[in-house]
Amino acid sequence: MTAAHLDGSATIPRESTTDILRRIEAAHGTYATRTALAFDADGTLWEGDVGVDLFEAFLAGRFARPEAEAALRREAEAFGVAAEGGAHEIASALYAAFNAERYPEDRAFAMMAWAFAGWREDELAALVDRVLEEKGHAGRIRPALLPILDWARSRGVPVYVVSASPRAVIERAVARLGVAPERIAAMTPAVREGRLAPELGAPATYGEGKTRALERIFPELAVLAAFGDSAYDAALLRAARVPVAVSPSPKLLAVADSIPGLVLLAT
């Protein structure tokens, strides 16, 4: 085991997959109730961000539809984002503002899900499949986490995925890892008359919203271990007996001291 330095002062233990599995196994034996593993998706289970990949394909194809325009315009006005034109132009301006850190992450990630307003779910699924294939998603999955997923299956410990990306892309991205749709919480647009609506149909899965989403979908379980890479995964990590940072962002490292017992997975 080694230690990584944070901000020149604090340290975080850096451990191998085997070391972390020992921690999880030891903690598992102390619970009388059922436990689960909880994972962030983008940057954690795999390299890159499939939600961003999907939205960039959406913009590149000029796929925004009139059903999204009014909600996109309200969003731009609320955050002082100058936007002219129709749905595509406004969505593009909001994305540029997000990349310039002038549009909050929580609102941006929600927008990236409901901006598909007017689409049928099967249309979106087809685009998701194309994007995952073009981006080589299967080759981006982190090998260091596969033994942990195998351990969970062998012990009958359920695996949940909580993501701020659109549910449609997360469902298909984690299917190859054996995670069932009912064990996923992600940004989920409302559906009306068979088409996506320009608003969320479930609470946002960002920051504290991730832990609340887990409480809704498995209120009787305890979080045995959690894995994340971003500062907005901090609440999820604090909820776990074994919190694990995976390729952590600088913002997560900056708040690492607020997460008791945090360890860093050596990938």
Image (cartoon, rainbow, N blue to C red):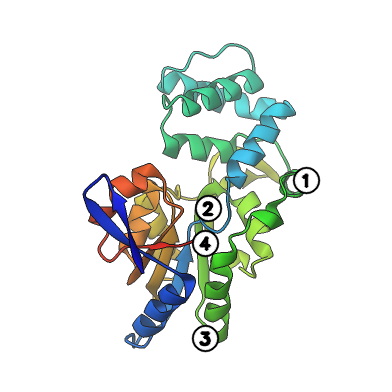
Look at label 2 and name its amino acid.
Answer: Ala
- Closest to the camera, between mark 3 and mark 4, is 3
Look at label 3 and name its amino acid.
Answer: Arg
Check disc 2 and report the residue beneath it: 186
Q: In this rendering, does residue 64 appear at all?
A: no
Check disc 4 and report the residue beneath it: 161
Is label 1 in contact with label 3 (beta carbons under 8 Å)? no
* Mark toward the start of the polypeptide (4 vs 1): 1
* Mark toward the start of the polypeptide (1 vs 3): 1
Residue at 63% over, 36% down: 55
Q: Residues within 10 Å of mark 2 (few under 14, many from 20)?
A: many
Is label 4 in contact with label 2 (beta carbons under 8 Å)? yes
Distance between mark 4 and mark 2 Cα atoms: 8 Å
Q: Is residue 252 left or right of residue 108?
A: left
Q: Residues within 10 Å of mark 1 (few under 14, many from 20)?
A: few
Check disc 3 and report the residue beneath it: 155
From this view, report whether residue 252 is shown above or below residue 52.
below
Q: Secondary structure at mark 2?
A: strand
Is label 4 in contact with label 1 (beta carbons under 8 Å)? no
Look at label 4 and name its amino acid.
Answer: Val
* Mark toward the start of the polypeptide (4 vs 2): 4
From this view, report whether residue 219 is shown above or below residue 199.
below
x%, y% of residue 34? Answer: 41, 82
From this view, report whether residue 263 is shown above or below residue 221.
above
x%, y% of residue 257? Answer: 24, 54
Q: Is residue 113 left or right of residue 215?
A: right
Q: Is residue 84 left or right of residue 251?
A: right
Check disc 1 and report the residue beneath it: 130
Distance between mark 2 and mark 3 Cα atoms: 25 Å
- Closest to the camera, between mark 2 and mark 3, is 3
Q: Residues within 10 Å of mark 3 (few under 14, many from 20)?
A: few
